[in-house]
Amino acid sequence: MNEPVRELYSEKRYPALSHPVTDISRIAVTARLGGLQRLALPAGSRVMEFGCASGHNLLPLAARYPKSDFTGLDFSDTAIRSARRASWEAGLENVLFEVADLEHWRPSHPCDYLIVHGLFSWVPDAVKSRLLDLVSQVLSESGVACISYNTLPGWSLKRDVVPLIRSLAGNPAGAALGGNVVEVAASLAEMAGNSTAHAAHLQATCREIVRKGPEVLPFDDFAPVCDPVYFAQFAAWAGQRGLRYLGEADLRENLPEGIDPAAFEKLAPLAADPILLQQTLDLLSGRTHRNSLLCRADAPLEEGTTTAAVLHFATGLGPEPLPQAHSGSPVTRAFREQVEAAGGNCTPVQELLERTASRLGVSWDPTHHSQEIAGWVFQMARIGCLELRADGIEVPSSPGAQPEISKLNRYFSANGLPVVDARHVTCRYPAGHERLLASMDGTRPFEALATQAAAEFPDLDFARWISHLAERGILR
Ligand SMILES: C[S@@+](CC[C@H](N)C(=O)[O-])C[C@H]1O[C@@H](n2cnc3c(N)ncnc32)[C@H](O)[C@@H]1O
C-alpha cells in the first residue's frame, strides 16, 4: 500500500529543509492564544516529528532547547542514519531518531508538540487514517499537533494541471514546451497570460510549481500520492478521533491573505460554527495549503486569555512593515519605538513594557497600558507586522573578533547542507560558501576568514555577508 511512497524515498533524497511554521516557539504562541494555556513551554517539553527525514527540521530545535526531549521517526533508514550522525556530530544528547513505518508503529510515550509536516497529503488513505489515530494517541493532555496538508477548493486547478504537465513533459511531441515539469510549467504560465480570470489563475498555479523547483516537486505536487482535502473533511476526521481544531500554526494564516476586511465583518456571526467559517475562508481565499493545529478534544481550554497570554511572550519586528507611526496612541507609539530599537531581536514583552514605562514616566498606568499594548501587539502579529514567540531571540550586534556558528550549523556546512538561522529558516548561500561557514568555529580571527574569503570568492563583500549572518542569528 505504501510502496510507491517507499520507492520514491529509496530512489531520491529528500532535500534538507527546516520549516519556520513548525518552530515550536511559534506553535506555542498560537496554541496558547487558542486557549491551550497549559501547553508545556518549548524549553521544557517533549517534541516528536513524524516523517522527520534526515532531521533538518528537528535538529535545530533540539539544539535550541537542550532541556527538552526530541524524537524523530521515519521509515527511511538512510534518512535516519543521516539524522543520527548529525545529532552525534553536533553533540546533541536530547534527540533520538527511530526507523519506523508509521502505518504500524505504536507510541511508547506522550509528547507536547507533534510535528507532521509534508506527510499527511502525501501518503495513502490508510496511512492518513493511521496518522490521525496516532495523533490522538500520542498527544499529552495539553499537547498540540501541527499538521500540514493541501486544501480544496484552492488545490482543484492544480489537480488538473499536474497530470497534464506530467504528460507534456514525458511526450516528445511536447518538446517545444520544455523537457521537464518545471520548464513545461514555465511555458504554460507564459502562454496563459492573464487576460481572463482563468488565465491569471492558471498562470499563478504554474508559477507556484516553477517556484517550488525540481528539488522539491517530486516529493510535493508531483509525488506518487498528493491528495488535497476539504478543511471540513479534515476537521471531521480529526473529530472522529477525539481531536479538536485549534487554529493555524502561523498566526497570520488565521486571516488568510486577499480577503477584504469587510468580508470578515460579514462572516463574524459564523464564529459560532468555526469549521464552516474556516471552509468559507478557504473558498474565498483560494488557499491551497494549511498548517493546522490540533489538540485533544478533552484538553482544558481557557477562554478570553489573549491579552494576558501576549504579556508572557516575546515580540520583535515581523516580515511586514508596521503601519505609519502616527497612527497609534502615544502609549503604543512609545512601545513601538522600543521594538524598533531592538532591531533583529525578539524581546520578552515584559521587558519592552518596562522600557516603555520608564520612557513614559509618570503617565504610565501599568494595568491599563499593558492591556492596551498587548491588544496592539496581537493585532500587529495577526497581520505579520510583529512576530510573537514563546521565548526571545538575541542576535549578536556585531560578528565579533572570532566569528562562530553553532556546532550543528558547522556540521551542516561541512556536509554541503544549508544552515538554519535563529528563526528556523533554511539559508542557502552560493556554492563554496559552506567552506567559510564550516571554518567559523570561534578560533579563527575575523581577518583570517576575510583573507580566505578574498582568495576563494573575490566578488564576495565579506564584511557585509558576515553582518548578515549576525543579523540572522546564524553567528552566535
Ligand atoms: C516530504 S518528506 C517530509 C520531511 C519533513 N517532515 C519535512 O517536511 O521537511 C516525507 C517524509 O516522510 C517519510 N514517510 C513517508 N511515509 C512514511 C511512513 N509510512 N512511515 C514513516 N515515514 C514515512 C518519508 O521517508 C519522508 O522522509
Image (cartoon, helix red, strand yellow):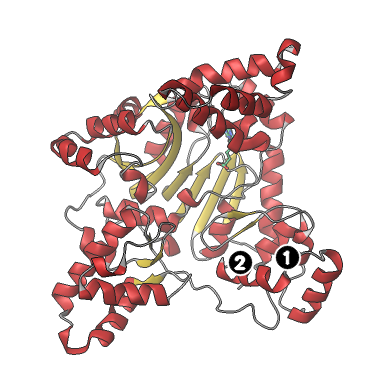
Query: Relative to residue 135, is residue 129 depicted above or below?
Result: above
Which amino acid type is shown beneath numbered disc 2?
Ile
In the depicted structure, whether residue 142 falls above or below residue 183: below
Tell me the residue at 27%/87% (across/down).
Answer: 358
* Residue that protrudes farthest toward the top in the picture: 173
Residue at the farthest front position: 195
Instruction: Work out which residue is located at the far right of the displayed protein and give it.
Output: 455
Q: Which residue is mark 1?
A: 437
> SS of the residue at dot 1?
helix
Q: CA distance from mark 1 to mark 2?
A: 10 Å
**Can you tell me which quadrant of the image ligand 1 is in?**
top right
Of the 4 image quadrants, the one containing the N terminus is top right
Sequence order check, earlier mark of 1 and 2: 1
**How far across and how far down the image is residue 37, in percent?**
27, 57
Whether residue 350 sits left or right of residue 165 in the image: it is left
Residue 453 pos. (x, y %): 80, 69
Tell me if label 1 and label 2 are in contact, CB under 8 Å: yes
